[in-house]
Image (tube, helix red, strand yellow):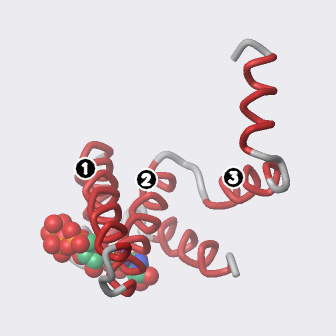
Amino acid sequence: MSDILNQLHQVLEARKGADPDSSYVASLYDKGLNKILEKVGEEAVETLLAARDTEAGGDPEALIGETADLWFHSMVMLAHLGLGPEQVLARLEQRFGLSGHDEKAARKARGE
Ligand SMILES: N=c1c2ncn([C@@H]3O[C@H](COP(=O)(O)OP(=O)(O)OP(=O)(O)O)[C@@H](O)[C@H]3O)c2ncn1[C@@H]1O[C@H](COP(=O)(O)O)[C@@H](O)[C@H]1O
């Protein structure tokens, strides 16, 4: 299921040094971290608005599209900073099966 994330990451890496006029991803790298973060923030807001619409009976396709935009721009952010989906997926795997309540209690017990 996560293969597309790895394939997309390879494309994002390959876009480093590409022409910003012919590649949207290269144009984001070229504009820098602040522009990438602006897009991540924008897509996060669009995602939450679409989630509210979906709960109110709207078309879930809009929410699926906005979530894809959010994941995509988050991946551009990670790639720009030399990171990739493998680290995030590994973190989710580490957490798998550990209740959020238990994880928070363990963090508090460690004084974090
Ligand atoms: N998955 C995506 C993807 N999802 C969304 N987008 C683009 O992200 C932008 C989203 O911005 P908005 O929704 O704000 O729409 P907009 O008004 O066009 O954007 P702005 O002008 O406001 O920046 C759009 O231009 C979308 O086309 C994507 N662009 C690229 N990819 C992947 O990245 C690969 C490389 O893309 P290029 O670098 O452009 O070749 C592609 O082959 C795809 O696999």
Using the rendered image of the protein, determine whether residue 94 is visible from the camera's viewpoint: yes
Q: Which residue is mark 3?
A: 87
In the picture, the quarter occupied by the C terminus is top right
Label 3, label 2: how many angstroms apart (C-alpha)?
13 Å
Q: How far from the left and from the top, in percent, is residue 85?
A: 62, 61
Q: Secondary structure at mark 3?
A: helix
Task: Decide: is 46 above or below 1.
Answer: above
| Percent position of residue 2, x then y | 68, 76
**Which disc number belongs to residue 38?**
1
Give the percent coordinates (x, y) of residue 109.
80, 17
Task: Name the amino acid, label 1.
Answer: Glu
Rendered residue at 60%/73% (across/down): 5
Mark 2 crowd level (few <14, some 14–19, many ≥20, 10 Å Cα): many
- Residue lying at the far top in this picture: please name it: 111
Q: Which residue is the site of mark 2?
A: 77
> Cβ of disc 1 within 8 Å of ligand 1?
no
